[in-house]
Amino acid sequence: MSRISGRPAISTEHVYGLSLRVARWRAGAPGTPLLFLNGIGADIAAAAPLLAQIHGREVWTLDMPGVGGSPDALLPYMAPTIAAVVMEIAGRLGHQMIDLAGFSWGGALAQQIAIQFPGRVRRLVLMATTPVMGAPGIGWAAMFDDDMLASGLKIQTATPLGIAYQTAAMAGWSSAGFLARLKNLSTLVLAGEQDGVMPACYGRMLADQIDGALLEVVPGSHLFPFTHAEAISARISAFLDQPAPATEQAAA
């Protein structure tokens, strides 16, 4: 697949009994690759307009079990297990060090990965997410999101079992007692100023608990990474491209 067409190369990875569809833009490009983790029920196609605009690096994402091109899991899974699955795929792709971006449910999983795999994440971008998953993230509430209705964007491609397992994976999950461990991890927190699913207060909670994290409240509601893809892709690129701070150099 051409690296400049805007279309990703698609493959299927078989890990721990799961078959997961993976999409890679600019596979093999130099620099630290960016892994994007999507919201609950959202697939590669939903993320493509955002990810295709993040240039200068490899960008990849995957469909979770029961979403898009990935079949249902045979058994439920928890956050640490799916985090290990994702990082096993990263290793197979040759990515020992990654930049990591997560949206909503995927933002919670991104926190889990950063905590569970210290030293393998260079920079972290958390969008419309929370340190306490008392709500199911994007879920069905996104069907009533202002940006969703205005854009006509179709986001749910999951099976009922896929949604149930994604929800169960984060039931009772919290990173609140562990975020202090990320003090040397350069982190950008983006919150939508009109987000009714994950209000900006959750972003402030994250930024308060991650020493040195940068919080920005941006236009849009819950789906701002998709409905404002051009602006958000530019902001992510700028964050990833900025010179390494002293804390990041010390942690390297």
Image: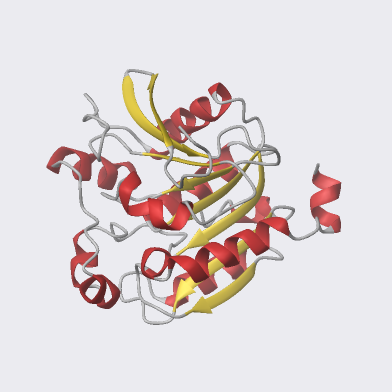
Q: Residue at x 66, y 62 (%)?
A: 239
- 218 to 95, vertically: above or below: below
- 133 to 18, vertically: above or below: below
Q: Nearer the viewer, residue 186 or 218?
A: 218
On the image, the x and y values in percent for residue 147 come to 29, 75
Q: Quadrant of residue 187?
A: bottom right
Query: Is 148 left, or right, of 57 in this rendering?
Result: left
Q: Residue at x 47, y 44 (%)?
A: 5
Q: Is residue 174 visible?
A: no
Q: Is residue 98 visible?
A: yes
How many tags in the picture?
Answer: 0
Residue furthest left in the image: 160
On the image, the x and y values in percent for residue 33 come to 61, 41
On the image, the x and y values in percent for residue 61 come to 44, 41
Quadrant for the N terminus, please: top left
Q: Nearer the viewer, residue 197 or 47?
A: 47
Q: Nearer the viewer, residue 176 or 68?
A: 68
Q: Residue at x 80, y 45 (%)?
A: 251
Query: Is 165 left, or right, of 52 in this rendering?
Result: left
Q: Quadrant of residue 121?
A: top right
Quadrant for the C terminus, please: top right
On the image, the x and y values in percent for residue 57 come to 63, 45
Q: Residue at x 86, y 57 (%)?
A: 246
Query: Is 7 left, or right, of 121 in this rendering?
Result: left
Colour scheme employed for the rendering of this structure:
secondary structure
